[in-house]
Image: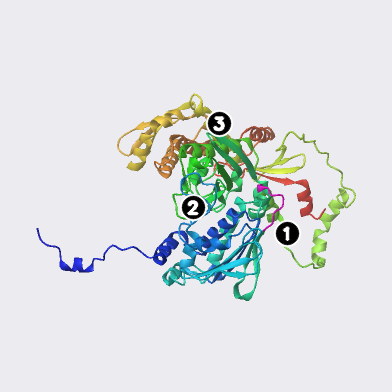
Amino acid sequence: MSARPSHILQDRQPIRQLDDAAANRIAAGEVVERPASAIKELVENALDAQARRVEVFYADGGKTLLRVVDDGTGIPEAELPLALSRHATSKIDGTDLLNIHSFGFRGEALPSLGAVGRLSITSRFIDATGAFRLVVDGGKLGDVQPVAGPQGTTVELRDLFHATPARLKFLRSAVAEARAIGDVVKRLAMAAPDVAFVLRDISNGKERITFRADVEDGSLQARLRKIMGRDFIENALEIEAEREGIRLSGYAALPTYSRGAAVAQFFFVNGRPVRDKQLHGALRAAYSDFLSRDRHPAAVLFLDCHPELVDVNVHPAKAEVRFREPGVARGLIVSALKHALAGAGHRASTTVGTATLGAMQPEARPEVSYQMPLHRERAYAPVMGFAEREGWQAGRVEDVPQAEVPNDLPLGVARAQLHENYIVAQTASGMVIVDQHAAHERLVYERLKRQSGANGVPSQALLIPEIVELPQADCARLLEAAEAMFGLGLVYEAFGEGTICVRETPAILGEINAAKLLRDVADELADLGQSQTVKDRIEAVLSRMSCHGSIRSGRRMSGDEMNALLREMEATPHSGQCNHGRPTYVELKLSDIERLFGRT
């Protein structure tokens, strides 16, 4: 056996114990990724200290200054040096790492911050006669000094990462870092609606409040109205459910109030903001029946359980959690949200009507007087004379009698069809405009779901089977799913290499292009991949099928047909949005319409 090269032994370093400064800098790499991470740790400490008001200051996106001021219980003079040592905490005694009731408990935040920046802590313990300050620079502790100060704690961090300058290169622009700080503060403000928050930017010697949340009535709804906006609250469903020791509460928005990215999804576990892939996946699954893949639901959800049912110690920054029974938490979210969405009936987002009214607003134009040229006045004279003879002049227009619309018809009575696609209906308090194709597509989809869940979707045999040529990969997917498609009323079989024979189609779809339907089903199966559950995959295929059986744009409908569609929409869950999350109708209140014309 040959000897190892001598240079390997020369390069080998002996095993040694790292000093506290190096250990703290390594820990800071896990706990403090950016200024927003430092703010999160400090504000959580303030909340654990029972603060009723928290003020956060930052400069240059937090790169040069971070300051958190709270009115909590404070830290006694004798404990200030201990607070800056690793794994020192008042939150737990170390005997039970599962029974956690506080935000912080690892005892790493303050020493980590002191290791990578210039840190000072000024604190006055409750009922103490004065305050004390301790300064740490690059991990080196100074002496505790008496100072003047109110009850509570002020932590100031200057020149973040000055002791580890290489980390500065990984920070983003000051604007991006400030945005991340704002996101952290808003999440914590949601978690503690009974605490007042103020966020101030003091860059360049100027102070600007970038976020403020006062305590109104201490309710979650009031806090969410401030952070998420009034539109979210007006279009959100309140969620309350419980299963096997886990309680779910919060608000989830209607599908028509969806977003283009997952920026309005917030989860809290035992009051702690978390970003957990399983929870976000459960939210996505709950809306899978209502939104296309490029739309994302908006929700603020709180899961509360006994601390022993969830491990919050799986991530240094405590951003992820692990449930003892993850299937219970996921199932609770999916079932509770689907139940709430079903209870919303045909309701659609109010923002749809607001956007419509905004689009109708006339552009502001300077007022100008206009005198009709003489040659045009002569040309219009015969028409104007006809109007006068027929009584169209002011004060002589006869009133057109209205049919009364009952209050129990939310979508009203059909009055007209425009462009052979939009139904205009009069309601008791205004009007609605219905997209006939989108609405009927949803109705057909809901019927298909009901039938597939009972005895299967009835099929209709084609007089002449259709032979469809497809890529080999699509054929393989279709043949693999043939048994499931049989239960949906779509019957086909292999007919040579790269060819499939369609023999029956769902009866509810009527006369359709079977080849196009099969290609759409193949595309849907390709899009879904293998990650979806069987039920989700079937519903996705049904959604694609329903488009083939819906009333097409460009079809003229009779008054009876239009009213029948409105009545079925009122009786069908989720009919306020099509299968892709877009609205099926727009509602305009009479008061809003009158405002358009300056009548109010």
Local secondary structure at mark 3: helix
Q: Quadrant of residue 578?
A: top right
For badge 2, the amino acid type reads Ala
Which of the two labelled residues, at mark 1 and mark 2, occupies the earlier sequence position? 2
Judging by the rendered image, the residue that carries numbered circle 1 is 362
Q: Residues within 10 Å of mark 1 (few under 14, many from 20)?
A: few
In the rendering, which numbered label is found on residue 315?
A: none
Judging by the rendered image, the residue that carries numbered circle 2 is 319
Against 155, is 231 above or below?
above
Name the spot of residue 160 as percent of width and height, x first.
Answer: 50, 69
Against 583, is 371 above or below?
below
Q: Residue at x 57, y 37 (%)?
A: 336
Judge whether residue 435 can be spotted in this image. no
For badge 3, the amino acid type reads Arg
- In the rendered image, residue 346 lying in the magenta stretch gets the answer no
Say which of 362 and 71 sits in front.
71
Q: What's the magenta region?
A: 213-220
Tally the numbered discs: 3
Name the spot of residue 375 as percent of width and height, x first.
Answer: 80, 66
Residue 320 falls left or right of residue 242: left
Judging by the rendered image, the residue that carries numbered circle 3 is 447
Say which of 134 and 304 sits in front.
134
Nearer the observer: mark 2 or 3; the answer is 2
Which of the two labelled residues, at mark 2 and mark 3, occupies the earlier sequence position? 2
Name the spot of residue 239 as percent of width and height, x first.
Answer: 61, 40
